[in-house]
Image: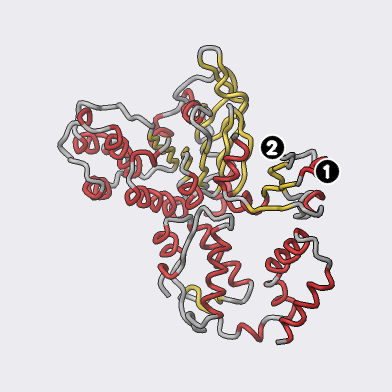
Amino acid sequence: MNAVLKETAHAIAPLAVHGLTHCYEGSNVLRGVDLALEPGSVLGLIGRNGAGKSTLIRAMLGLLEPLSGEARVFGEPALKLSDAAKARLAYVPQQPEALAWLSAQQMLDFVGRFYPRWDARFANQTLERWKIQPNKLLAKLSPGERQRVDLIRALASQPELLVLDEPAAALDPVARRELLREVALRAGESGTTVLFSTHIVSDLERVASEIAFLHEGRLILRCGVDDTKERYARLWLPASKSAAAPAQALSRRRHEDGSLSLVVERDAQDRWPEAANLPGARVDALGLEDLFVEIAE
Amino acid sequence: MDASLLTIQPNAPEPIYRQIVEQLRRLIAGGQLAAGELLPSVREVAGFHAINPMTVSRAYGLAESEGLLERLRGKGMAVAATRRASQSENQRLALLEPQLLELARHARELELPAEPVLRRLTKLLGD
């Protein structure tokens, strides 16, 4: 019985998009994005401001109609999502605006009724820990406090799919760590699938199982976090050897003295490109942040 | 053992699961962790450090396959009792592979031929 359930769950990606394109006022924001999440995975979406992260998330959830391409949530078309599917997911936008005329407590009590697995105790405890005045109107809270209330709402609903757009911006380091802990344990133990966008790379390194780099509307890298660290490195070649640089590289930067920095990948036999063995060549391991800066520049 | 004994640096180039295995290796080699001592559960480590439980499982699995840890039925992971004896020379040599690769890389960067490096290494090992 369990095996059957598992197999069904594997067949249907909680979130999947294919060939998504979108543009605002003539400029392309998404230029053909394919992305699917495995159940129970934690995908960190990273990119510079304006890379299209929020647009991609909104299109994935059916909150905006893309120019072309398709988006599916639990296998249903995202633009015509059933109520049953909506009850299984929680999304926290960067700037929550809904139900502003209610207090935090009223809003949580109200929306809690719509979720079969609502955890009221978690909601109340976290309100207190995250120092939100329960009786203050949402409209009177700061943007950061608003997002914190919305994070509490999302977590208390115990969703199967949790989508967070830049959740770290609103939280101090202690609360941020607490959120990461929730995300990590829920993914690991309840099999919650998580998609979150961020520009704080170390958050992503803690909890994400995979990362996707969105750059100028395209996914330029999609890889397991550990794999990324082990598979990619920076290769530096002195000017005299720069002609021997491999043709394949994720990024290529020439310095003023003629030396060359490249982001290179191991081949199928785990070897670096030949040029790494040249005298004077150097291979440096890259943290995700350095990798991100190298290829997003 | 307490989960706080581990130090996690998420932004280091070394993946977190490798950081954990490396620290376990050091703690065991240094005697801070004695044979038979129980390790914190995957949940405890993941919760304390706010990291993905899959990462901790992967680290424990790797440490188990290297013979550092053993799984005690119903109790979780513990420091392996008979580590040395259970590992062949090849297995122990494989543990040294990352450092050897690193050494070879540095030697190449310094454009040193193999012979003086090997001579020096032989001397160090002989002491």
- The amino acid marked with disc number 2 is Glu
User: Does residue A252 appear in this view?
Assistant: no
Give the secondary structure at mark 2: loop
Measured as percent of width and height from the top left, residue B19 is found at 55, 63
* Residue that carries the numbered disc 1 in the rendered image: A244
Q: How many labels does the image show?
A: 2
Specify how the rendered protein is coloured: secondary structure
Question: Is A278 in front, or is A217?
Answer: A278
Label 2 or label 1, whichever lies nearer to me, is 2
**Left or right relative to A219: residue B30:** left
Residue drawn at (79%, 42%) of the image: A242
**Is there CB contact under 8 Å for labels 2 and 1?**
no
Tag on residue A256? 2
Task: Classify B18 as above or below A232.
Answer: below
Measured as percent of width and height from the top left, residue A172 is found at 32, 46
Could you tell which of marks 2 and 1 lies nearer the N-terminus? 1
Question: Which corner quadrant of the image does residue A245 belong to?
Answer: top right
Measured as percent of width and height from the top left, residue B120 is found at 76, 77
Residue drawn at (61%, 33%) of the image: A219
- The amino acid marked with disc number 1 is Ala
The quadrant the C terminus of chain A occupies is top right
Question: Which corner quadrant of the image does residue A289 belong to?
Answer: top right
Tag on residue B102? none
Q: Disc 2 and disc 1: Cα gap in Å?
A: 18 Å
Give the secondary structure at mark 1: helix
Question: Is A112 in front, or is A249?
Answer: A249
User: Does residue A266 appear in this view?
Assistant: yes
Q: Residue furthest left?
A: A135
